[in-house]
Amino acid sequence: MPSTNRLAGLLHATAKELRARFEKSGTASGHAGSKGAVREDYVADFLREHLPRTVEVYGSAEIITADGRISPQCDILIADPATPPFFSENRHRVVPNECVYGMFEVKSRLDTTELRDACEKIARVRALPKTAYYPPRAPFIYKLHAYGKTWSHWPTAGMIFAFDSVSLETLAIALMGWCRDRDPTEWPDSVWVLGKGCLLWAPRAPVQFDYAPEPGSGLVALAPLPGSDILLPMLLNLHPLLARATMPTFRLMAYAEAAQIGTVVTHIPWGSAANG
């Protein structure tokens, strides 16, 4: 029986709408790139409506670092609302890495090849350096534990969302195989498949899920209850995580230290001007 909880009912109805829009987009457009962009917008709109207002959701964005590195194109970015507008045109943005809290890779149908592609992109993005912050002043020292290590900034969370997929068991086996020889700092945080279920990490026990994997974490494939879907558990996973997302004070100057801002014409020290 479907849950009688009001929030669960609303999100189940939203899942039906997402599924209907997904199917409609497949009928309306024959171009794979156009369909993919539209479906990314569907997910971005849902996140924008339901995530805390302490974060901003951007679709189709690239990440830039202070030393000039550029990420692959990201389907969806979740960033601090104070993010400066480096570049914004139509549906594409360029975002400084220090301001990024998380990313979503969106797939129409998730198979093992698409899963590996999404995992590789998440690993590349999380490896980008975050250095453009003002030094913290005691006693306000920023420390966060995730992925088996301590961070001096918020590490970028990486999630995967799909409208359809191969079986959850197949995805779980493929994900554990991909993670086996890699550090937890490269692993995705979660995988969500509309209508099928999700993959979550369970560091301590199968009934205790965590927001981020730790060394030795197990992986749980969780199917929704009959008549429900994955949007409620996804929201319950993301909301408390991102409600606590913060960043040290962003230092914009680090991105412009080599830039020239003008030429000094003259300098007149105070009191040195000639009288009369």
Image (cartoon, rainbow, N blue to C red):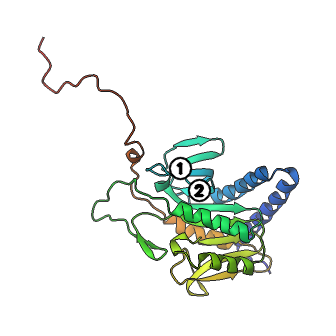
Image vertical order of residue 64 relative to residue 167, above or below: above
Q: Secondary structure at mark 2?
A: strand
Q: Secondary structure at mark 1?
A: strand
Image vertical order of residue 220 relative to residue 97, above or below: below
Q: Are marks 1 and 2 in contact (CB under 8 Å)?
A: yes
Residue lying at 55% horizontally and 66% vertically, measured from the top left: 157
- Pointer 2 local density, CA inside 10 Å: few below 14, some 14–19, many at least 20: many
Q: Is residue 267 left or right of residue 248?
A: left
Residue 243 seen: yes
Real-space CA distance between mark 1 and mark 2, rounded to the nearest whole angstrom: 9 Å
Whichever of callouts 1 and 2 sits on the residue coming sooner in the sequence is: 2
Of residues 237 and 162, which is closer to you in this image? 162
Residue 72: which quarter of the image?
bottom right
- Amino acid type, residue under disc 2 in the picture: Leu
Residue lying at 38% horizontally and 45% vertically, measured from the top left: 253
Image vertical order of residue 223 relative to residue 235, above or below: below
Residue 231 seen: no
According to the image, label 1 marks what residue?
95
* Image coordinates for residue 115, horizontal then vertical, percent: 69, 69
Of residues 110 and 23, which is closer to you in this image? 110
Image vertical order of residue 31 relative to residue 106, above or below: above
Q: Quadrant of the N terminus?
A: bottom right
Dot label at residue 77: 2
Of residues 93 and 127, which is closer to you in this image? 127
